[in-house]
Image (cartoon, rainbow, N blue to C red):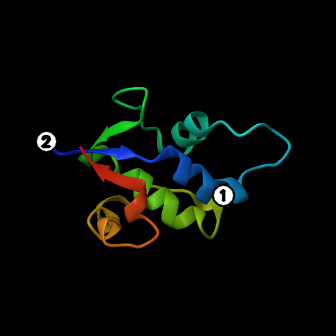
Amino acid sequence: MTTYKINLDMFKKLIEPFTPKEEPFDIMKFFFKYTKIHPIRPEGWFELARIQAFIGLVRVARNNLHKCIDLASEYRFLALQDPLLAPLLVVE
């Protein structure tokens, strides 16, 4: 199965403006809180099927963080062609 590496630095830059300023930003806590996805390995690799929530999260977070939900597969393949999302995904 194809796996993808999440570029956590780029993810953080994209999401950080939407996070509460009164607490330190923890990218992995934030990711799990809104997606309920655990990394396969600590460096941030995910199965393709489990990346769907991430894609939905990023799309929604660009507008409204509090509406972070799993938008599922409608964005899975679009993400690879999206100029904002493609840099977040690297094929292993």
Label 2 or label 1, whichever comes before in sequence order = 2
Taking the image as shown, residue 10 lies to the left or right of residue 3, namely right
Q: Nearer the viewer, residue 49 or 67?
A: 49
- The residue identified by callout 2 is 1
Asked if the residue at tag 1 contacts the one at tag 2, i.e. Cβ–Cβ closer than 8 Å, the answer is no
Query: In the figure, 26 relative to 16: above or below?
Result: above
Tell us which disc is closer to us: 2 or 1: 2
Taking the image as shown, residue 92 lies to the left or right of residue 65, namely left
- Quadrant where the image shows the C terminus: top left
For this orientation, the residue located farthest to the left is 1
Q: Which residue lies at the image location 34% right of the left edge and 49% below the top edge?
A: 51
Query: Which percent across, then down, holds residue 25?
Result: 71, 40
Q: Residues within 10 Å of mark 1 (few under 14, many from 20)?
A: few
Amino acid type of the residue tagged 1 in the rendering: His
Query: Which percent across, then down, holds residue 26?
Result: 65, 36
Amino acid type of the residue tagged 2 in the rendering: Met
Instruction: Write down the quadrant of residue 37 in the picture.
Output: top left
For this orientation, the residue located farthest to the right is 22
- Quadrant where the image shows the N terminus: top left
Q: Which residue lies at the image location 78% right of the left edge and 49% below the top edge?
A: 20
Task: State the SS at label 2.
Answer: loop
Taking the image as shown, residue 87 lies to the left or right of residue 63, namely left
Query: Which percent across, then down, holds residue 40?
Result: 33, 29
Disc marking residue 30: none
Q: CA distance from mark 2 to mark 1?
A: 32 Å
Q: Nearer the viewer, residue 67 or 42?
A: 42
Task: State the SS at label 1.
Answer: helix
Query: Which percent across, then down, holds residue 58?
Result: 51, 60
Q: Which residue lies at the image location 45% right of the left edge and 48% below the top edge?
A: 7
Taking the image as shown, residue 51 lies to the left or right of residue 70, namely left
- The residue identified by callout 1 is 66
